[in-house]
């Protein structure tokens, strides 16, 4: 299935995503007649690739390469890329840096998945968890196997960070953050007037029910399959969901967080958002409608390999990236 212009429009109508429109950036301000060689084209291409992928100016031999884009896959295995992309993912998946390194769970998990060359979905669904040792400046966070893990979504610091403050312990903030990270969902919260009913009854009012109980991303419905927050003074714990199946994501029946996340990574929206991340990383902006052939190729290549490196490679190797 292709994600062309019509498919893109249909998707954006179904799930709200933030994205501006920008013109394709050109490296050269000098026009060259058709067939005329551009002696600086390869050096500019090398510079663009090196800056985008590694955050550095190109080495002399790379700048002199006759085909810089042939080195893209090698660059995607470079520790500099892995570090840079992991930080990028952390910035996209959070509103700001965590108070502790453990709260930046997306960064640590992305770095682990990229280093291990695992499928990108493992950042969300792999049986892993974060552990931390040491104190203060000597604190070290690592990713370890955990049969009860679910990517970073069951990491205790991440759960506490996004537990939210719903009156009965329903994790609306967690449900939203999960859909934001996996699918790219972006919703704008509205401010309530003092004394407004913020209970489930109030959220079912005409002004709020679309986001909370209707549409693909119904927050209250999704939160029903997650654990609940229990607060006792400064102590916060979580109780498991009751196991009652709920219809989420347009009608998929799930009973817990694992089934909820699995349904998302198995959807076409996941591949779409992965390629949107690839465009954002490489271009610093969302894709344009005129770039739908490249975007389609990105989606198809990612669906085949499962690795986000493939999505990035497809976009970075396209001739238009170095124009």
Image (cartoon, rainbow, N blue to C red):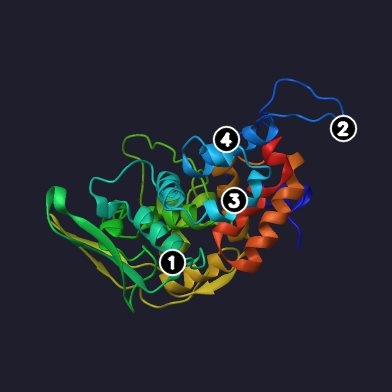
Mark 2, secondary structure of its residue: loop
Asked if residue 275 lies left or right of residue 153, the reply is right
Q: Residue at position x 64%, y 65% from top?
A: 303
Q: CA–CA distance between discs 4 and 2?
A: 23 Å
Q: CA–CA distance between discs 3 and 2?
A: 26 Å
Q: Are marks 1 and 4 in contact (CB under 8 Å)?
A: no
Label annotation for residue 47 = 4
Q: Nearer the viewer, mark 1 or mark 3?
A: 3
Mark 1, secondary structure of its residue: loop
Tell me where residue 149 sits by quadrant. Answer: bottom left
Kindly identify which residue carries mark 2: 35
Kindly identify which residue carries mark 3: 72
Mark 4, secondary structure of its residue: helix
Q: Are marks 3 and 2 in contact (CB under 8 Å)?
A: no
Kindly identify which residue carries mark 1: 116
Q: Position of residue 287 (x, y in %)?
A: 66, 41
**Could you tell me if residue 18 is visible in this image?**
no
Q: Residues within 10 Å of mark 4 (few under 14, many from 20)?
A: many
């Amino acid at each position: 299935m292709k994600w062309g212009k019509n498919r893109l429009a249909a998707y954006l109508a179904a799930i709200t995503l933030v994205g501006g429109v920008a013109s394709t950036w050109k490296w050269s301000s000098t026009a060259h007649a058709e067939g005329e060689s551009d002696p600086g084209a390869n050096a500019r291409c090398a510079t663009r690739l090196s800056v985008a992928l590694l955050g550095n100016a190109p080495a002399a031999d790379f700048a002199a390469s006759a085909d810089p884009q042939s080195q893209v896959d090698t660059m995607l295995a470079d520790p500099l890329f892995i570090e840079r992309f992991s930080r990028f993912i952390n910035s996209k998946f959070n509103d700001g840096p965590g108070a502790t390194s453990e709260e930046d769970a997306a960064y640590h998990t992305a770095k682990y998945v990229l280093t291990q060359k695992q499928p990108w979905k493992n950042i969300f669904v792999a049986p892993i968890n974060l552990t931390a040792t040491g104190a203060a400046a000597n604190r070290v966070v690592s990713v370890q196997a955990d049969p009860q893990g679910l990517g970073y979504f069951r990491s205790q610091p991440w759960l506490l960070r996004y537990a939210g403050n719903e009156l009965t312990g329903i994790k609306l903030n967690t449900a939203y953050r999960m859909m934001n990270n996996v699918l790219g969902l972006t919703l704008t919260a509205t401010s309530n007037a003092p004394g407004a009913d913020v209970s489930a009854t109030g959220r079912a009012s005409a002004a709020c029910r679309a986001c909370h109980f209707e549409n693909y991303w119904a927050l209250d419905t999704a939160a029903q399959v997650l654990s609940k927050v229990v607060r006792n003074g400064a102590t916060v714990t979580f109780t498991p969901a009751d196991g009652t199946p709920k219809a989420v994501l347009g009608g998929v029946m799930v009973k817990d967080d694992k089934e909820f996340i699995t349904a998302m990574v198995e959807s076409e929206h996941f591949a779409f958002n992965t390629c949107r991340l690839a465009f954002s990383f490489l271009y610093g902006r969302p894709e344009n409608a005129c770039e739908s052939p490249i975007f389609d190729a990105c989606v198809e290549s990612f669906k085949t390999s499962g690795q986000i490196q493939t999505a990035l490679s497809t976009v970075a190797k396209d001739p238009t990236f170095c124009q």
